[in-house]
Amino acid sequence: MPIDTTASEDLDISVHHFAHEHAEEGSVSDQLILDNATALVTCLRDDAVWHPPRPIDFSVFSLTEKGVQYAIEPSPVREQGSGHKLGCTREKEWGEPVQPDEVDEGLEYLEEFDHGLLRGLLAAAVRVVQEPSAKIAIQVPPEVPTTHGDQGRAARPDKRKTYSERSISQVSKRPRFDEGSLFDALPLPHFESCLMTFENPWPPVQQADFYPAAPIPIPPHTHATVEEHVADEFSRLAWVIPVRGYLPWEGATPASVLADSPDDGVLDPQILKPEAPYQNPDSPSIVWTRDALRAFWQFLQKLRDADNLGPLGLAFYHLPASHTGSSMDPASWHHGSHKQDSTSWPVSPLQDNGCPEALEAPRSTLCQMDYIKVYHDARYTKFLRKVLNAWAYRRPSVKVRMLKGATLALLDECEKGLLLC
């Protein structure tokens, strides 16, 4: 409702108050509306208008019983050329040069800068520089025998090695994994088709159980569907033996390949040995050498030519050179693992101790690993698994059953996972 009134002798204003439709009538007095409008117009005037101040409640600034006040005196500043202390100093104008004596005197009162993180980094750098390299020969002065007992002990060689000697031997004899393509690891051809003949029927085989443990069906298969596939005499299945990498099913045994020589370039037969899963129960894996891989391939060829397990087909699948070598990060290597491609497999972070053995096993596909596939009739599946488990790599003073304790994968006719055993 409009209200016409005179605010002062020289000011004539008209105030309009727009109330909400649900507001109560008379909730705001006309005098209050007029006072608010007068205050608004007064703020826009150029001339000064004096008004009495509002009362202030000073009780809000009073301290309570638990209030505490902290007061610290400012650092004193010495006046140039005298021993008097001043509480403050004059601020220089913008662009005014600083006198050399002011800089020298000010630096005397500055405390030394101390940064905890920087101190730790510098200390670590000093330790690295001071520690001798593991490959440097550490000379230990021989003990001088002083008694008869000391002479006897000095004559006998000490079987215990010092920590430095053990570390040097471990570093110099450490094997390395093969990072390149395995195309030349086996002789060509890498595919051996099965021998088909109609003159002599394939010999029957006795029903046997899986060895060494019961099979684990790969979803969506169950024990019933697994037995149905294995019992079908017209079905063709395939065992997959990993050569380097991880099978795409959890629980399968990984594999890796050692290079022909360790890092120092010296071939040591005592170091370059293959390993089987049963030799490392905590982290089972298959560690091949190129010689062991060739021996296993020759064994499969003889098994195929013998015609004792039906028509066997052999195939060796290897990654192309573009997926190995330079495109792989050495940090992704660990015992029983395949060198991963940074574009296909994510690298797992290292643990606090920096051990690559603690990395979690990445899952891959069959297209991202090297493996051997043995095609066979379904009725020979169980017996063939026992034969693979019994084969041993034999060399002078070396005998390793490479697939003992390993968990292999069985594929169906559609190249899909059927079971793990």
Image (cartoon, grey):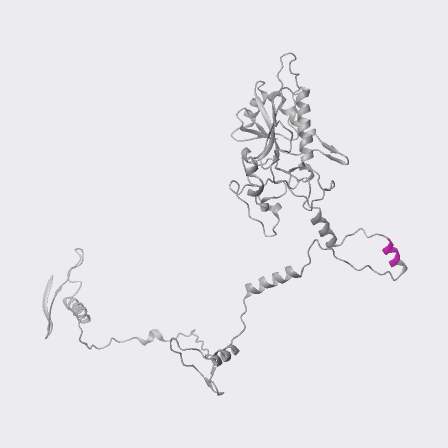
Q: Main secondary structure of the magenta part?
A: helix
Q: Is residue 175 left or right of residue 81?
A: right
Residue occupying the far top of the picture: 199
The foreground one among 22 and 287 is 287
Residue drawn 60% across the image and 46% down it: 358
Quarter containing the C terminus: top right
Displayed quadrant of residue 316? top right
The correct choice, above or below, for 311 with respect to 410 in the image is above
Residue at the far right in the pictured view: 148
Q: Which residue occupies 58% across, 62% down? A: 121
x and y percentages locating residue 75 in the rendered image? 47, 79
Above or below residue 44? Residue 131 is above
Q: Which residues are magenta?
A: 150-155
Left or right for 40, reference 251: left
Q: Is residue 405 magenta?
A: no
> Residue 222: x, y in percent?
54, 28
- Does residue 402 show up? no
x and y percent of residue 220 in the render? 51, 30
Locate residue 114, reporting x and y percent. 54, 69
The answer to whether residue 152 is magenta is yes
Q: Residue at x 57, y 65 (%)?
A: 119
User: How many numbered marks does the figure carry?
Assistant: 0
Classify the position of the N terminus by image quarter.
Answer: bottom left
Instruction: Judge whether residue 302 can be spotted in this image.
Output: yes
Where is residue 32, by image quadrant?
A: bottom left
Foreground: 72 or 304?
304
- On the picture, is 398 further left or further right than 421? right
**Above or below 208: residue 131:** below
